[in-house]
């Protein structure tokens, strides 16, 4: 299948993407997400301090959506740059029993723009008791996440595609 642009961050991006931190669960991580530039030059940037204190450990920017990805899709690709740290893509499907459950795949965001391809087969269930795989057509949320360690997060994404 040909790559399908999921988001190039043009248009009314603020209406599509939401910033969330672990404070919703008592954590102390802090940060923010913003769109820099406009049109074909728009970039989504997630920055902040991730802290594992007080059972915390994440900041994220996410999009919930209802348009189904093709059942034949094999993965997602992102054009990213960052500060050399490890970040994650979290995917969600309907019927996960807890709000913190997701399917997760890591990537490293180098200081130069690069395309990262994440096959769905490389995504892992976040918790025991979840189904170990998912149908691409059932994905209804995607998040770019700084997670799981104490560090300064700084990652930019200018394109997400489903392949």
Image: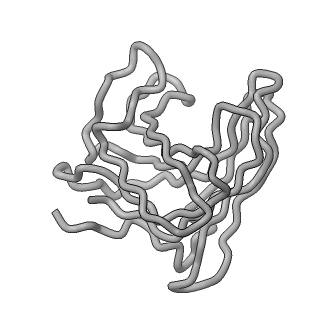
- Looking at the image, residue 108 lies above or below residue 155: above
In the image, is 110 to the left or to the right of 96?
Answer: right
* Relative depth, front residue between 108 and 22: 108
Find residue 8 and report its horizontal and vertical position in percent: 47, 73
Quarter of the figure that contains the C terminus? bottom left
Q: Is residue 95 above or below residue 108?
A: above
Q: Position of residue 30 (x, y in %)?
A: 81, 45
Q: How is the image coloured?
A: one colour
Q: Residue at x 59, y 72 (%)?
A: 43
Q: Quadrant of the N terminus?
A: bottom left
Residue 98 screen position, x and y as percent: 52, 24
Q: Nearer the viewer, residue 138 or 116?
A: 116
- Write down the quadrant of residue 145 in the picture: top right
**Which residue: 36% across, 64% down?**
161
Q: Residue at x 42, y 34 (%)?
A: 103
Q: Is residue 132 above or below residue 18?
A: above
Residue 18, quarter of picture: bottom right
- Side of 35 relative to 89 (left or right): right
Residue 35 position in % (x across, y down): 66, 71
């Amino acid at each position: 299948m040909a790559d399908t642009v999921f988001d190039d961050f043009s248009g009314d991006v603020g209406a599509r993407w939401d910033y969330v931190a672990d404070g919703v669960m008592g954590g102390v991580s802090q940060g923010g997400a913003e769109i820099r530039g406009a049109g074909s030059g728009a970039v989504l940037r997630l920055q902040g301090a991730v802290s594992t204190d007080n059972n915390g450990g994440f900041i994220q920017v996410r999009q919930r959506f209802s348009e189904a990805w093709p059942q034949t899709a094999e993965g997602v690709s992102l054009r990213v740059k960052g500060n050399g740290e490890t970040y994650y893509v979290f995917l969600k499907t309907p019927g996960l029993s807890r709000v913190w459950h997701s399917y997760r795949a890591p990537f490293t965001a180098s200081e130069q723009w690069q395309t990262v391809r994440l096959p769905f087969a490389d995504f892992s269930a976040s918790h025991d008791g979840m189904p170990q795989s998912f149908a691409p057509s059932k994905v209804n949320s995607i998040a770019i996440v700084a997670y799981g360690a104490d560090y300064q997060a700084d990652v930019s994404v200018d394109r997400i595609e489903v392949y």
